[in-house]
Structure formats: structure tokens, C-alpha cells
């Protein structure tokens, strides 16, 4: 049976892997992006003909930017919609945004017609969301849910509480989710199932103990 962890333990494992074990955060982000890209290729329910990446300004959005670059460099059509204040972006997000600029990946804006895309990638929030979603984020989530395209979520569908599975005002209804290292406790609750879709658990080198634990797919 696949293990799940709390949001706090997820934070602690991230910090331990980076600060104690010594794997740089950008390395983990690159590994996550590769796994997410592979999950999307694996999922035959997703049409990758025209992709819109929904990226917050934290590391969840940074993962999305890695996916954008991998898709573009393999011949897919991709646009990036960044939501939030770029001045408050994480360092890793800023580094990934610079790489995306190098590859000249086109940008989208809040008034974008989401129905022109065949798939949306949700990189707005990570699992640590602690308050109800509002503002532009809520607008984008609601537009995504109203669009014809399926959505693939990164780590957890944005707006879902990682510990309880509660919807924090509004939340992405994903066809599938790539969760990083371990599924979060709230993702496997009954109330979360309509939002997570098919869950991929991606091994990127973050472990509770020293022994390797096989990444798995939750049906």
C-alpha cells in the first residue's frame, strides 16, 4: 500500500534532503519536472497537442516551468501563464523562468481563452495551502475547471488542502496528478477523489528513511 504523509512532514523531508543530505533544490526540481513530463506522456487520456502551463510564483510553478521547457524542446506547443507577483517569486522559480525565456516559450495572460488548449498543467500552488483561494488564482482555477481541456496537476490540485482533502474555496478538478515523493494525506480522502483523478507518485530522491522506496501509481 502506498504511503502518505502530512504537509508538515513533506516540508521537513524537503528541507532535510536539501540542507542535510545535500541534494540541491534545483536538482530536485529538475527531477520532478522530468517525472511529471513522463507521467503526462504515459497518460493516454491527455492530449498534449497544445499545452497551457498555469504557474504560480513558488516552486510548484517552477516545476511547471521545467515541464514547459521539456515539452517545447520535444516539439510540443506550449504557452505559460504566470499567476502572482513575479517580484515575490522563489529563487528556483526565477532561475527556471530565465531558462524558459532563453527557449522563447510564449507567455499567456489572464484574459486567455483556455478552450484553445488541449491540456492545462496546474502548477499554481503546492500542498502547503493554508487559506482559501482568492483573487486571480481563484479566477484562473474556475476558468480551468470550465474549460474543455483536461488538467494535469503538479503535487496536488491547487486549492485542495493537503492534510484534509478539503476544498479551500475553489480547487482544480484534475484528470490526473503527479505528486512528489509521497501522496499527501488529504489526497486519498473520499472528498478529494473528484479533484485528483489518477495519481502518480514520483520518486525524485526524497525518502523518509535511508532505504529506497519504489514509486507507484495509485489507481
Image (spheres, rainbow, N blue to C red):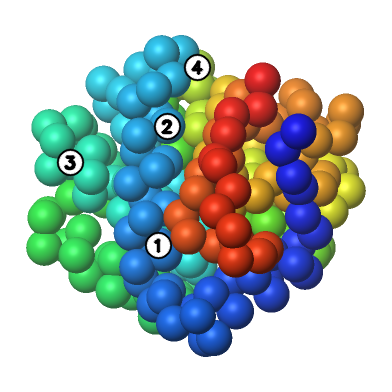
**Of discs 3 and 2, which sits in the foreground?**
2
Residue that appears at 21% across and 59% down: 100
Compared across the picture, whether 190 is left or right of 29 comes to right
| Tag shown at residue 39 | 2
Residue named by callout 4: 148
Give the mark nearest the N terminus, 3 or 1.
1
**Of discs 3 and 1, which sits in the foreground?**
1
Residue named by callout 3: 72
- Which image quarter: residue 112? top left
x%, y% of residue 52?
A: 36, 37
Q: CA distance from mark 3 to mark 1?
A: 17 Å
Quarter of the figure with the C terminus: top right
Label 4 Cα neighbours within 10 Å, binned few <14 / some 14-19 / many ≥20: some
- Say which element carries label 1: helix
- Say which element carries label 4: loop
Residue named by callout 1: 29
| Depth order, front residue of 80/197 | 197
Compared across the picture, whether 93 is left or right of 105 comes to right
Label 2 Cα neighbours within 10 Å, binned few <14 / some 14-19 / many ≥20: many
Q: CA distance from mark 2 to mark 1?
A: 15 Å
Q: Mark 2–mark 4 contact, CB under 8 Å?
A: no
**Of discs 4 and 3, which sits in the foreground?**
3
- Say which element carries label 3: helix
x%, y% of residue 155?
A: 58, 48
Amino acid at each position: 500500500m502506498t504511503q502518505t504523509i502530512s504537509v508538515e512532514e513533506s516540508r521537513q523531508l524537503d528541507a532535510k534532503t536539501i540542507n542535510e543530505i545535500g541534494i540541491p533544490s534545483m536538482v530536485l526540481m529538475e527531477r520532478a519536472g522530468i517525472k511529471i513530463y513522463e507521467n503526462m506522456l504515459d497518460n493516454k487520456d491527455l492530449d498534449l497537442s497544445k499545452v497551457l502551463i498555469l504557474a504560480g510564483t513558488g516552486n510548484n510553478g517552477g516545476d511547471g516551468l521545467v515541464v514547459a521547457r521539456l515539452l517545447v524542446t520535444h516539439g510540443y506547443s506550449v504557452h505559460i501563464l504566470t499567476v502572482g507577483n513575479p517580484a515575490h517569486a522563489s529563487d528556483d522559480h526565477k532561475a527556471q523562468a530565465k531558462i524558459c525565456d532563453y527557449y522563447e516559450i510564449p507567455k499567456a495572460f489572464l484574459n486567455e481563452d483556455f478552450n484553445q488548449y488541449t491540456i492545462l498543467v496546474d502548477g499554481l500552488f503546492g500542498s502547503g495551502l493554508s487559506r482559501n483561494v482568492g483573487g486571480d488564482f481563484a479566477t484562473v482555477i474556475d476558468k480551468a475547471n470550465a474549460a474543455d481541456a483536461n488538467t494535469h496537476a503538479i503535487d496536488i490540485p491547487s486549492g485542495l488542502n493537503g492534510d484534509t482533502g478539503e476544498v479551500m474555496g475553489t480547487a482544480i478538478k484534475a484528470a490526473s496528478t503527479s505528486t512528489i515523493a509521497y501522496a499527501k494525506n488529504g489526497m486519498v480522502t473520499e472528498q478529494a477523489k473528484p479533484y485528483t483523478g489518477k495519481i502518480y507518485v514520483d520518486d525524485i530522491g526524497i525518502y523518509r528513511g535511508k532505504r529506497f522506496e519504489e514509486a507507484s501509481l495509485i489507481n
